[in-house]
Image (tube, rainbow, N blue to C red):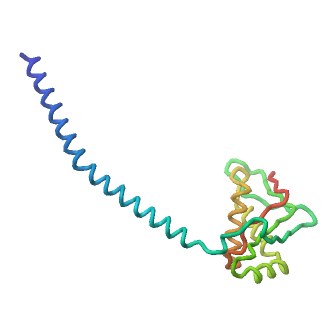
Amino acid sequence: MKKNILTIVIMAASLINLVLTIVLVFSIMPAMNKTGNLVDKVASVIDLEIESGKDKAEDYVVTDLKTIPITYENSVKINLQKENANDDPHYGVIDGIVVSFNPKAEGFKKVFDSITNNNVYVSDTVSEVIGEFTLTSIDQNKVRQEAVKRLQEKYDTKAIVDISLTNFLTA
């Protein structure tokens, strides 16, 4: 008799669980589908705005770029940040910098002439960016991207599109 009652209780609990699962599926699934559709619509609108927000400064061909090489007589050593466990001094070494410009961008001529006449701000910016990294966190691509971003902000232009570090080494 005890086994039959236990079987009936388990069967009732299983049926209640099945009914509640069905209710949850039919009440939550439509809401989840609506939310998914909303997210898709918002994402498509954002993609459209990003595409329409592109200006001519970002459209360039590598062969059209103008460059300014900045070379040093001797390799320049730039101190890196110290790491937590290691107090040994580390540094980055560069022999020069090459700044690439998009000649189609607004303000190109002004910025190109300014950097051609006085490239000290470019050297300082690249040195500052390199000096913010530690030996384990430094990556040439990160340095280049951050330096370009800062130079664009400093000169208030999108004409500066890339920099290259000549013989970049860390030690």
Residue 88 lies left or right of residue 106; in this view the side is: right
Q: Which residue is pictured at 80% across the width and 81% down the height?
A: 114
Q: How many marks?
A: 0
x, y percentage for residue 8?
Answer: 10, 24
Q: Which residue is pictured at 41% across the width and 59% down the height?
A: 40
x, y percentage for residue 53?
Answer: 55, 73
Where 43 falls versus 114 (above or below)? above
x, y percentage for residue 57?
Answer: 67, 74
x, y percentage for residue 22?
Answer: 20, 41
Q: Nearer the viewer, residue 128 or 99?
A: 99
Q: Nearer the viewer, residue 10 or 74?
A: 10
Q: Which residue is pictured at 14% across the width and 27% down the height?
A: 11
- The picture quadrant where one finds residue 18 is top left
Q: Nearer the viewer, residue 138 or 80?
A: 138
Identify the image quadrant of the N terminus: top left
Q: Nearer the viewer, residue 123 or 113?
A: 113
Where 58 falls versus 134 (above or below)? below
- The picture quadrant where one finds residue 162 is bottom right
Where 118 falls versus 27 (above or below)? below
Residue 18 lies left or right of residue 125; in this view the side is: left
Looking at the image, the residue that sits furthest to the left is 1
Where 84 falls versus 19 (above or below)? below
Q: Which residue is pictured at 15% across the width and 31% down the height?
A: 13
